[in-house]
Amino acid sequence: MFSGADAGQRFTLPGEETILGRRLESSETRGGILLRDARVSARQAVIRNGADGPTLEHHRNATNPTLVNGTAVRAACLKEGDRIEFGRVASPHYS
């Protein structure tokens, strides 16, 4: 992470589906990444690793935007070097 409470942290995507959010259900903690920022929704987004590469999807109930390279998205195919932002939490690049 580039900024936010988790600045300096590096996260590995744990599986085919990774849920990102401020508050994860107990069943999601193994397949999720907890983002400690009040501006991040409880369930902000999910990253799915598919045959065509990783896809980031904004969660339908998230009240805060999900940005890829500064643009609000509902869904985006990720490529190395993409900057992902949720609230004040930003990753310097996706890799």
Image (cartoon, rainbow, N blue to C red):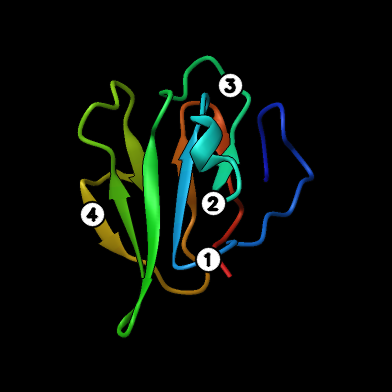
- Marks 3 and 2, how far apart at CA: 19 Å
Badge 3, how many Cα within 10 Å: few under 14, some, many 20+? Answer: some
Q: Nearer the viewer, mark 3 or mark 2?
A: 2
User: Residue under circle 4?
Assistant: 75
At 57% from the left edge and 60% from the top edge, which residue is drawn?
93
Q: Nearer the viewer, mark 4 or mark 2?
A: 2
Determine the secondary structure under disc 4. Answer: strand
Seen from this angle, which residue lies furthest top? 38
At 46% from the left edge and 25% from the top edge, which residue is drawn?
40
Q: Are marks 4 and 2 in contact (CB under 8 Å)?
A: no
Seen from this angle, which residue lies furthest right? 8
- Marks 3 and 4, how far apart at CA: 22 Å
At 58% from the left edge and 70% from the top edge, which residue is drawn?
95
Q: Nearer the viewer, mark 1 or mark 3?
A: 1
User: Residue under circle 2?
Assistant: 31
Residue type (three-letter) at the residue carrying disc 2: Gly
For the image shown, how many numbered marks are present on the structure?
4
- Marks 4 and 2, how far apart at CA: 19 Å
- Marks 1 and 2, how far apart at CA: 7 Å
Q: Are marks 1 and 3 in contact (CB under 8 Å)?
A: no
Badge 1, how many Cα within 10 Å: few under 14, some, many 20+? Answer: few
User: Residue under circle 1?
Assistant: 15
Q: Earlier in the sequence, mark 1 or mark 3?
A: 1
Residue type (three-letter) at the residue carrying disc 1: Gly
User: Residue under circle 3?
Assistant: 37
Indicate whether 61 appears above or below 3.
above
* Residue 14 in picture, x, y percent from top left: 59, 61
Determine the secondary structure under disc 2. Answer: loop
* Residue 49 in picture, x, y percent from top left: 40, 71
